[in-house]
Image (cartoon, grey):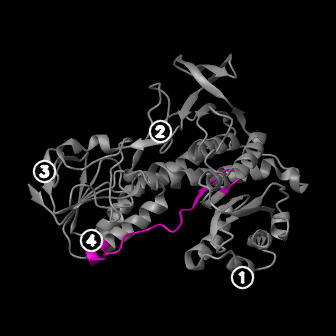
Amino acid sequence: MKTYDLIIIGAGRASNLAVTAGKNGKKVAIIEKSTLGGTCPNRGCVPSKLLIGYAHVARAIKESKRHFINATINKIDLEKIFEETNNYISKIDPRYASRFNENVEIFKGTASFVSNHIVKVNNQELTAPRIVIATGTKPIKPPHEKAWTSDDIFPLNKKIPSSITIVGSGFIACELANFFDAVGIKTKLLVRSEKVLGNEDIDISNIFKEEFSKTLDISFKTTIKDIQHDGKQFNLTLNNNESTITHSSEALLYAIGRESNSDSLNLQNTSIQTNERGYIKRDEFFETTAKGVYVVGDASGEHMLQHAAAYEVNHLSKILLNGYDKPLTFKYMPHAVFTEPEVASVGITEQKAKEKNIKYVSTTTNWLASAKAISTRLKYPVTKIIVDPTNNEILGCHMIGPESSTMMHQVLAIIHIDNNINNLKEMLYIHPALSEALLPAAVSVVKEIENYNNK
């Protein structure tokens, strides 16, 4: 049995902890069943955004008439697009490995617990007084063996399809549908309900549905009754509003959510507890129900975002290596959806505020006060701000429009430093930058606060 100071299971964001611990002279074992770097750079947020870059350019050309420009696309080299993306992915594993010093030993294989502090990998047992579980999540398995998940897209080693059907209504389904459709692959999105991005604020979700449906073939209130594959394509029987229709495509991709990876860890050999969904329970210091064993990132099922995982790993590093004794409390948790339209959000939605009987005021303001926004010749972009009228705190902010994810950081800075909507109202903006659209949004909601308090 080999003994270490620290064992890390999962080499995604937690690889940063391995790097830091190794530099601090700790003997570290890091175990990864796939490629180093984990889901984000290999199969998730990074390569998907590389693809969206191509989609953005293709859509800009297709929609150039909006700017009185008549342009056409002569060719989209899909082989080259995927070659470049696959090439990027191929460099992730060695890039991550190069960050570790001689104190970090890499094990490629699936880890399983023998007991609380003994882990087995490749028939070899390892032990350490501290173990970190960072195994992330996996896509929910499709009902047909030839159907894809997002893991099959990155890298795409299969034939590029001429047509694809995507099942789902969340950000992964929408981002991939946006890409495939934009680059000329015939795309159909199947949505079980009447909503896309149903977790967003209702006003933003409604605008998104209207705009997204203008360019994409979406079937709402539709489920797949039967799947047949004839060796070349999928032949689907769909239930749509109680009627039955048929649809065919070369590829079928399911993006219906992700689930816990804890089933591979043999946690029954430990005192580590999971919740009803299989995610690993932890306290405010990331410690599981087994002393000295910690869990970070998606494996906890709490904040399933890469930036949250990185933030947690950084905090856990302080706890394990520097004796830091304060728990991590997320003051806010932002996210974005990189489609066209682009969406960004932080904090509570209006429907959630109503559900929890929270006092609030809100306004929804267009971006037309910004000349840069006007130059896009888009009418739909808006900012919705939800504020507590008793103390001026921003409870939520939701945007839809170009570069929403970038613009949101201005709001995040206010929330992070001194969460008062007046700070967003009184700050100096560059004229006529896109971010200037936030000024009338802040002015508008401050007026609503005044009206609320003068009733």
Residue 445 found in image quarter: bottom right
Q: Which quadrant does the N terminus fall into?
A: bottom left
Query: Disc 3 or disc 1, which is closer to the eye?
Result: 1
The label number, if any, that marks residue 320 in the structure image: 4
Residue at numbered disc 2 = 152
Relative to 297, is 253 on the left or the right?
right
The residue wearing badge 1 is 427
Q: Are marks 1 and 4 in contact (CB under 8 Å)?
A: no
In this orientation, does residue 454 appear? yes
Q: Where residue 316 sits: x, y (%)?
A: 33, 68
| Circle 4 or circle 3, nearest the eye | 4
Q: Examine the rendered structure and indicate whether residue 99 appears above or below residue 208.
A: below
**Range of residues picked out in magenta:** 319-343
User: Which is in the foreground here, disc 2 or disc 3?
Assistant: 3
User: Overall secondary structure of the magenta stretch?
Assistant: loop
Spatial separation of the CA atoms under disc 2 and disc 4: 36 Å
- Dot 3: few (<14), some (14–19), or many (≥20) neighbours within 10 Å? some
x 35%, y 74%: residue: 326
Amino acid at the residue labelled 4: Leu
Residue 326 on the magenta segment:
yes
Query: Whole-percent x and y of residue 246?
Result: 66, 18
Earlier along the polypeptide chain: callout 4 or callout 3? Answer: 3
Pointers 3 and 1 in contact (C-beta within 8 Å): no
Residue 131 screen position, x and y as percent: 23, 59
Give the residue pinned by disc 3.
Answer: 125
**Residue 1 falls left or right of residue 208:** left
Counting residues from the start of the chain, the first of labels 1 and 4 encountered is 4
